[in-house]
Amino acid sequence: MQSHTLREHFRALGAVVVAALASSCGTSPTASSGDAACVVPDTGLPTDVFCTGLYTNRSTATFRADVMPYTPGVTLWSDGAEKHRYLYIPKGTTIDTTNLDAWKFPVGTKAWKEFRVDGALIETRLFWKRNETTWESGTYIWDATAANATLNTDPHGVILPSGYEIPTAKDCDKCHHGGADRLLGVEAVALALPAATGATLASLAEKGLLSAPPARTAVSLPEDETGKAAAALGYLHANCGMPCHSTRGLGDETKLVLRIRAGEIWPAGGTSSNGASVATTDLAVSTMGVAPTTAAVAHAFPGALRITPGAHDKSLVWLVSHLRGNYQMPPLVSHRVDEAGTQSVASWIDALSP
């Protein structure tokens, strides 16, 4: 795949799209996309992106009125791709937010994410909750004209000539297992931060889409004396904590927790305006001056602690995020270092008192 030109890649995909359209579209008017030509299967995903319920009139410029765009206040690095996100909650249902740290979505929920690389629409990812226990997920790859996209079934993923990788559904699942109910970024903390837009925590509450909205729907991440903590915590939360390093994921095994819990921002009752101090967060407790628990990591990075105050180059949370290859974090799909994001972590660590 790496030896093909981008034009050759998209030409091949175009042929697949034609076949996919023939197999996924019929005469049923019941498709969620609003396109009377679409047939949505009872299990699995439609092979045509225009049959998923996101777009109208087979145009990427028009979206269904019941689909809500959103941007979390902190976002995952995707090798520099521009991303646009959309959420659909079935009419008459609500997100169960009884546990503000573990949202449960109603059956029928869909979340899409469009990816553009160098201005070109490359892929659209979909997560769809088909029943109480099953989420369907997949990636649709766009042709060179951005007029057609078909479900990717390549078991090895697709790497474009630019080096950008389109993951398999299995790869996506490796990160999304960190979500309480699969979705990442659609959560209390990320949607309540100042930079969040669209379907924010406040707007979801106003629309009556949260079963138990907190009294406060706008929050900030905790800050410390350095004035650099909030940016670093936000980066680690989105890129490490939400996907893997939480008490729901690897954090339960390694005790490395990099996710900011809603319970830390909204103390009991959800009405406090103070929230947590940096020092008392799970993130700080599990990293500050803490040695790695994995022997191989300790051997590869002698003398490094998870966070070594005053020395980012001796701090594992920066070292592994600034690598591509052995020990890189995130461990899959990403091939480019997020220089700006990792710098926010380095700046905070260097400003901490040893």
Image (cartoon, rainbow, N blue to C red):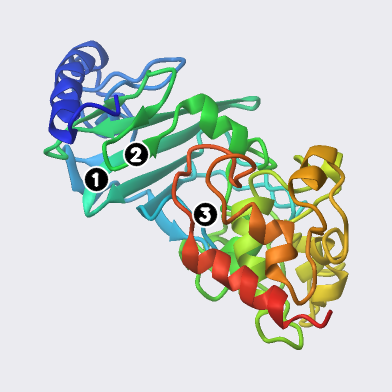
For residue 293, the mark is: none
Q: Quadrant of residue 310?
A: bottom right
> Disc 3 residue type?
Leu
Between 293 and 193, which is closer to the camera in this rendering? 293
- Measured along the vertical axis of the image, is residue 166 above or below residue 39? below
For residue 76, the mark is: 3
Q: Quadrant of residue 164?
A: top left
The quadrant in which the N terminus is found is top left
> Disc 1 residue type?
Leu
- Measured along the vertical axis of the image, is residue 317 above or below residue 49? below
Q: Earlier in the sequence, mark 2 or mark 3?
A: 3
Q: Residue at x 17, y 21 (%)?
A: 12
* Residue pointed to by mark 2: 124
* Residue pointed to by mark 1: 121
Which x, y percent locates residue 257?
A: 79, 53
Circle 2/circle 1 CB separation < 8 Å: yes
> Disc 2 residue type?
Thr
